[in-house]
Amino acid sequence: MDIFTSESRSFLYQYLNNASPTGFESSGQQIWLDYLRPYIDSYISDAYGSVVGVINPDAPYKVVIEAHADEISWFVHYISEEGLIYVSRNGGSDHTIAPSKRVNIHTENGMIKAVFGWPAIHTRRAGEEPVPAVKNIFLDCGCISKQEVLDLGIHVGCVITYEDELIELQNRYFCGRALDNRMGGFMIAQVARLLKENNISLPFGLYIVNSVQEEVGLRGAEMIARTINPNVAIITDVTHDTSTPLIDKVQNGDIKCGLGPSLTTGPAVQNNLLKLIINTAKTNDIPFQREAASRSTGTDTDAFAYTNGGIPSCLISLPLRYMHTTVEMTAISDIENVVKLIYHSLQQIAEGQDFRYIK
């Protein structure tokens, strides 16, 4: 099963290097849909930008495989008279990594380059050093007045994304920004491709969902789940690799890149569906790890599980290092195994299958 063909790899780089901030995902969604078109029968999209490729659209039984398309970013919040720009979060942006990062400010006139400035080490006193916080990090785009900034087309509400591109490390990891969770969009697209190329005929309608606005409260999934009203939903997102320094495994679990996808147990995860996926992994010799969610998963799984009277839902997570930074890292082997697990799990779901415990 060849996940990384020359075509799929080219798509991955184009898709990951394109900015897709929360609320402004349209360009990335177009790239994703254009790649998916040969492998689907039809598609739907909604007013906020979630996109769904559909196979067997007339089938009454509906199965979803889903990822989210948006990445964290910043908004222009305040422009000082000196031409410096202060920001507010769009999603869970990490203020501690911002100083010295290069960014793109998205305007109607195109991209404006800027940097997060920070006082030089020579000007800071030990024990009295400022700590990066949303209230004190700022952008410098080379302007010397507020009016000059405004003349560039920059205004309050412009979205800001980090300037960083996808790379590979030791032929083992992909590294870059926004692997959370456009790598998920790549993976579900590969499932659709493999189904088509291997002439796999599913006995139900398959809805390949790339939803928006996960980073601000699972909003896109909430909307599209109501639109589709599926019978089953398999969600893929990222989870923390806890093997690197400064992470407490007692608090965050024991997950490591390269050891396979992680399967979550928790209230939002439907246990019978989880058993099907675990059995599929074992049957097909796909390695997997386990984690537990005490309340919510914090992923689109929650949005699907608790919509439309309850949709049997399951979460397959891709281990990720350094989440919400510009150097997110994931193992190539884990990507391949997530794709394989979804691909084989779909073939274990029967038309009209009832996952309820009590019948």
Image (cartoon, rainbow, N blue to C red):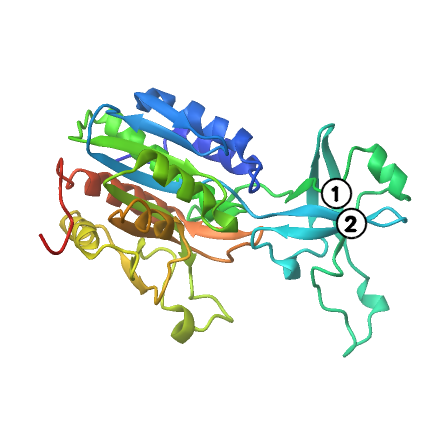
For disc 2, the marked residue is 78
Q: In the image, what residue occupies the spot 47% across and 47% down? A: 214
Q: Residues within 10 Å of mark 1 (few under 14, many from 20)?
A: some
Residue named by callout 1: 156
Which quadrant would the N terminus be assigned to in this image? top left
Q: Which amino acid is tagged 2?
A: Tyr
Label 2 Cα crowd, 10 Å radius (few <14 / some 14-19 / many 20+): some
Position of 208 with respect to 243 (left or right) is left
Q: Position of residue 12 (x, y in %)?
A: 46, 35
On the image, which quarter does residue 197 sit in? top left
- Number of numbered labels in the structure image: 2
* Residue 245 % position (x, y): 50, 69
84 relative position to 182: left or right = right
Q: Nearer the viewer, residue 118 or 47?
A: 47
| Cβ atoms under marks 1 and 2 closer than 8 Å | yes
Secondary structure of the residue carrying tag 2 is strand
Q: Residue at x 25, y 45 (%)?
A: 341
At horizontal 37% and vertical 68% (from top left) the residue drawn is 253
Find residue 126 and name its label.
none
- The answer to which of 301 and 95 lies nearer the viewer is 301
